[in-house]
Image (cartoon, grey):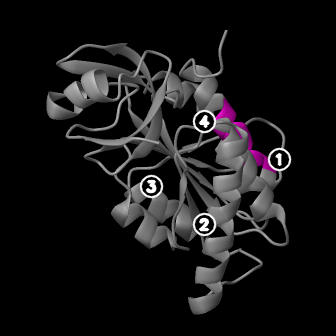
């Protein structure tokens, strides 16, 4: 597949111009409906469909969600993490950060953590291909809440907290519909500690409720992800 670098940030609709556009039009003779691989200057690699060609420019369209969602998931035991990664990728997540948290039952350090991340990346790749994603979401290295909050640059950050009773996820999302990136923090089976909640708040995360029922760790993240996509009109209808 032909690959082109675009000197602009990733977006749903992008333009290839200059020499590359002329090459597509005059040499490759590609038509609308054909696909190319694009690499934007913010490091996103994606498949894109040609929608219009001309000697000086080629317009391409990606089918990825317009809002970029990072799911920071507290480490869970057994095959639950595999399930979360697979389904989150199918739904449309952009990145997944495995979180080592105070109440996590499992602990991965050093080489074991690296091997787990390699396995999870393969699961993400397989899920992306099966669901016909235009990108393969990245599985970050296992991180602490401190590292996550220090390095995450999402414009909106939320943390699902079971004791939150003042504001729900919908309320927060509807007040942030102009955001272009969202961080969702989900705790492990044992929940989120008060210290971790305070650190998330200090980093700009807003505590939200996911409803009156207590959700399992492997259900909460997928529920929040689905709700975000729905609010941003990314689930059709």
Q: Secondary structure at mark 1?
A: loop
| Rendered location of residue 151, percent (x, y) | 35, 63
Residue 64 drawn above or below residue 188: above
Mark in front: 3 vs 4: 3
Question: In the rendered image, is residue 16 in sight?
Answer: no
Magenta residue span: 219-226
Give the residue number, with chain letter if any, for mark 4.
166
In which quadrant will I find the C terminus?
top right
Rendered image: mark on residue 201? 3
- Pick whichever of labels 4 and 2 is earlier in the sequence: 2
Give the residue number, with chain letter if any, for mark 1.
214
Q: Secondary structure at mark 3?
A: helix
Q: Is residue 173 magenta?
A: no
| Rendered location of residue 137, percent (x, y) | 54, 51
Q: Is residue 220 magenta?
A: yes
Mark in front: 3 vs 2: 2
């Amino acid at each position: 597949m032909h690959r082109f670098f675009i000197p602009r940030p990733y977006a749903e609709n992008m333009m290839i111009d200059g020499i590359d556009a002329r090459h597509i039009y005059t040499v490759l003779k590609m038509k609308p409906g054909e696909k190319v691989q694009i690499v934007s200057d913010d490091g996103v690699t994606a498949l894109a469909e040609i929608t219009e060609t001309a000697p000086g420019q080629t317009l391409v369209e990606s089918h990825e969600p317009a809002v970029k969602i990072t799911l920071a998931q507290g480490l869970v035991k057994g095959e639950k993490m595999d399930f979360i990664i697979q389904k989150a990728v199918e739904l449309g997540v952009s990145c997944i950060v495995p979180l080592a948290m105070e109440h996590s039952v499992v602990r991965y350090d050093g080489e074991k953590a690296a091997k787990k991340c390699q396995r999870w990346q393969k699961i993400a790749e397989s899920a992306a291909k099966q669901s016909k994603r235009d990108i393969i979401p990245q599985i970050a290295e296992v991180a602490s809440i401190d590292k996550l909050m220090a390095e995450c640059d999402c414009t909106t950050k939320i943390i699902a907290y079971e004791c939150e009773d003042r504001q729900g996820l919908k309320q927060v999302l509807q007040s942030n519909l102009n955001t272009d990136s969202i961080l969702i923090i989900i705790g492990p089976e044992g929940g989120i500690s008060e210290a971790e909640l305070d650190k998330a708040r200090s980093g700009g995360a807003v505590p939200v409720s996911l409803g009156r029922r207590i959700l399992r760790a492997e259900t909460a993240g997928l529920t929040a992800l689905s709700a975000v996509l729905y609010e941003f009109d990314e689930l059709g209808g």
